[in-house]
Image (cartoon, coloured by chain):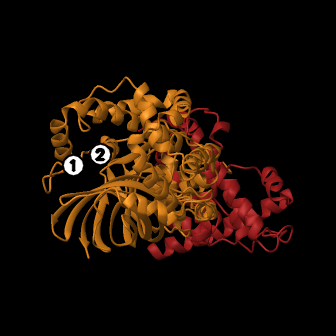
Amino acid sequence: MISEQTLAAKLKDRDRIAMKSLYDLYSGFLTAVCSRYILDSEDVRDVLQESFIKIFSGIDKFEFRGPGSLKAWISRIVVNESLKFLKKTSKEDFILSGEYEGPADGIADDITDEDLDVEEVPMEVIQEMIRKLPTGYRTIFNLYVFEDKSHKEIAGILGIKENSSASQLHRAKAMLAAQINEYKQNKI
Amino acid sequence: MAEEWKSRFAGKMEDYSGQAPEGLFEDIMSSIDAQRPEIVVIPFFRRFAKPLILTGAAVAAAAAVILAVLLPSSEPMPDALPLAEVIDTKESILPEKTDKADKTIGAAVKTDGDDKTGGEARTDGKTRINAETDVKTVIETDVNGKAESKADVNGKSDTDDKTDGKTGINDKDDAKDKTENKVDRKTDEKADVDGKADDKSDGKTGGKKDGEKDGKKGGEKGGKKEIEKTEEDFNVIDNGSMTWQDILLADAGKSGVKENRFALNVFAAGIPSSTQSVSAGYAPMDTRANYTPAASQFAYMSLLNRDKEVNTSTRHFLPIRAGLSFAWYFAPKWKVETGVSYAYLRSKSFSGSENYYFDARQELHYIGIPLNIGYDILNHKVVDLYVSAGGIMEKCVDGRTTSDYWFDGDKRSSDVEKTGIRPLQWSVQASAGLQFNLVRNLGLYIEPGVVYHFKNGSPVESSYTKQPFNFNLNLGFRFSL
């Protein structure tokens, strides 16, 4: 398999075969990333298209910083495009900013790592569980978990308060824990 | 570890991959392509590397015109020999004429070469306009009765020392080379021609000069702009001391006159020749500024070719023509001919890079009405010799362009587009005809000539636009009534 570094270099040369390679390598992954933010498949398609155009045309801005950096860079573009799309299409602020202050229901305070143990849960099931979260929770959850953003960063990105991000993440975790629990129950 | 769930979650989903939407890549490529309009704009800065390839057949046709004019009257002609053999036969019968004939052929080729160059070696609208002006000037001079076209031939043959072939056909290749070589020296030669034109005309061609002159007048009728001028000239003659009819009758007294008043012609024409040009970038035959091929594969292809050398090679074949015409002798030796003709114009182009290209085939169908005036130089029981000039008005009645898209040797798709040309196509022509009278009322004729197609403003390129000045070779049967 072609290395990321070589691939990036060829992309900078506007090599059409490299474009196809990049697409073949990562389009599935990027589709998964994008559909964690956006539910409608047509919208996902539009956002992906826009993202790839940004990737191919902005490849000159990419700097190789070791294995995985290209994948990280392109997924960041997809995430940014997804967020842009959400902001643009949501009629109201899709983040329930400051609305939720306290712990989520009864279970919220004591969600343990076991509650979120996804070892036995297939990936596509997890994907669907995430997609079932309300948009605001889902967005924050994705940014926190998959993009490794701090609450401060998330607050900056989404224009919300830091504690609002934390509490909504908490809420998302609680909802996921419930789903995971339910899945395990049904499985047994 | 408070955040262990997070890394487990992220780790678990790290390689999760969904199903990318169908056809997304193609859409991305098209959309990238659309953002880079320069890829499609290139055709308008096209440069023609090889402006013209004039094939030998066309030159042979010109040679045949000259030979036909020089033919003596008494030799019986074999009935249905192909052109080449006819010319050979004549050459062997007339050894003493060979030198002159050869020189004349050279001259004719030269003349044509010049005209060709004027008409073809150009890349932009400006030059095109100049070329047209040149041609018009020549025609107008003819109308004024100076018999310059004949004089040109003689004048040139005197100065031309390069002809070395033995017959018209053998000359083909040399002549072709010359025609191409002439491009650079065009200006000098033109000056020669102008200088020699007047004093070289001699009595020998006197009779023909009249024919040419008047024939040309008929030709002018084909071109809209020229009509007024022509009418003026007719009036001038009518008001002169010697009337139009007087001139005709004077000529008629010199040799045998056909008894028949009408003739019906069935003809076909087609010279297996073409012009080829190569240009950088994509150069569709439809040159509209906003035109790009409709096929969705085009955008994809141009993206794949983005960093490759892209060229377009276009070949326009000379029209294949067939038709029926009817001639009426309105005065002794003078006839007017009209009818209906069909023409088929075919062009081919290859556009793209070595691996990704499309080949387009353009086909145009024209229906036309010719109007010619002819003058019989010679009426013999075996052979008739005549000259004719006139015009044709044509309308493109149907056209289509079929494009096949090739990706690395695979034909991905085929696309058919309608190609329409709204404006009428006007052309003028002049020709010399040789008719072999097979039986009493039936003759086989061969009519080599030259034709000029006026610009009609259509953005669609064809043989008419790319090679407006051209040779023509009509073959047909004539029923005299």
Within-10-Å neighbours for mark 2: few <14, some 14–19, many 20+: many
- Badge 1: chain ID: B
- Judge left or right: residue A56 versus residue B413: right
Asked whether B232 or B399 is in front, the reply is: B232
> What residue did someone put label 1 on?
B83
Q: Position of residue B343 (x, y in %)?
A: 38, 65
Q: Position of residue A167 (x, y in %)?
A: 79, 63
Whether labels 1 and 2 belong to a single chain: the reply is yes
Asked whether B311 or A97 is in front, the reply is: B311
Q: Is residue B411 above or below residue B172?
A: below
Residue at position x 43%, y 55% in the image: B211
Discs 1, 2 touching: Cβ within 8 Å = yes
Q: Which chain is orange?
A: B
Residue at position x 59%, y 47% in the image: B137
Please identify the quadrant where the C terminus of chain B is shown: bottom left
User: Chain A, which colour?
Assistant: red
> What residue did someone put label 2 on?
B64
